[in-house]
Amino acid sequence: MGKPILLLRLEGPLQSWGSRSRWDVRDTQPEPTKSGVLGLLGCALGYERGDRRLLELDAGLRFGVRVEAPGRVLEDYHTITDFLPTAAGDFKVLGGTKSAAALRSDPDARPATIISPRFYLEDAAFLAALEATNGARPDLLQECAQAIQNPRWTLFLGRKACVPTRPIFEALMDRYDGLEDALCHHPWSWQGSPRPRPAGALMAYVEDPAGPLTRQDALRLNAARVYDFRRAHALAVPFPGAQEEP
């Protein structure tokens, strides 16, 4: 018997896993972040953004992700304004309503538009893996697995507009010896329209306190929504056997 591993499939037309998204520019990382996956688990469990139990998830779960298909980066030209037109032809502004003529005569109340570039991963697919750390509750993985299958709130892939195209829960199993073993040997899968098998090895990234890579996606609860740094190492995974699709 190996170590219990929770496996999640993250697939959808769009995903976005930001780590430095503040103010107008909303970035995405090339693969899901630990903070983003913990947020997904928090939605399933019914935890609000500032819930201290999210820190228990962060400390109690070790995270890894394998890139099944990298997708492409899409930039959305997004605009924001607080001047909303009404059916009568006026504008809602600053808690009230003003006519177009009033707006033209008031230099302090003229409409302003903010340009906010938003980045997404298009047609990407990932296998995320989680294992319990030594100090975690014995039932933590089981609780997360049950919540993912019966979520309290709607699940999404990084942002609320990014809906998954397949069930996120893949398995909770003890077939593998740990995260690295699961990411190296669990069958490759990518649902949807027929796609070619990726050439060469798959890339995986595993949380590792002594790892050479730095990832700014460790969960921290703060009003500025700034993430902390964590260490990780990369794995080049020989292509595992394809999983039979139903």
Image: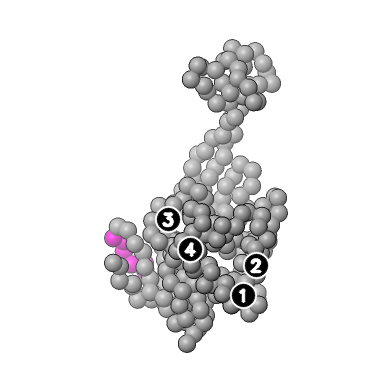
Q: Main secondary structure of the magenta part?
A: loop
Instruction: Indicate which disc, 3 or 1, sits on the residue closer to the N terminus.
Output: 1
Label 4 is placed on what type of residue?
A: Ile
Total residue callouts: 4
Instruction: Indicate which disc, 4 or 3, sits on the residue closer to the N terminus.
Output: 4
Instruction: Indicate which disc, 3 or 2, sits on the residue closer to the N terminus.
Output: 2
Label 3 is placed on what type of residue?
A: Pro
Residue, x 56% and y 70% (percent of image)?
63
Residue, x 49% and y 68% (percent of image)?
145
Secondary structure at numbered mark 4? helix
Residue 137's label in the rendered image is 1
Label 1 is placed on what type of residue?
A: Arg
What is the x, y in percent for residue 239? 39, 74
Give the camera-side residue of 213 and 18.
18
Left or right of 136? Residue 30 is left
Point out the stretch of residues depicted in magenta: 194-199
Q: Is residue 124 visible?
A: yes
Quarter placement of the C terminus? bottom left
Instruction: Indicate which disc, 2 or 1, sits on the residue closer to the N terminus.
Output: 2
Q: Which residue is mark 4?
A: 148
Residue 164's label in the rendered image is 3
Secondary structure at numbered mark 2? helix
Q: Which residue is mark 2?
A: 56
State the image quarter where residue 58 is shown.
bottom right
Labelled pair 2, 1 in contact (Cβ < 8 Å): yes
In this rendering, is residue 207 above or below 112?
A: below
Secondary structure at numbered mark 1? loop
Check if residue 195 falls in the magenta segment. yes
Residue, x 49% and y 42% (percent of image)?
76
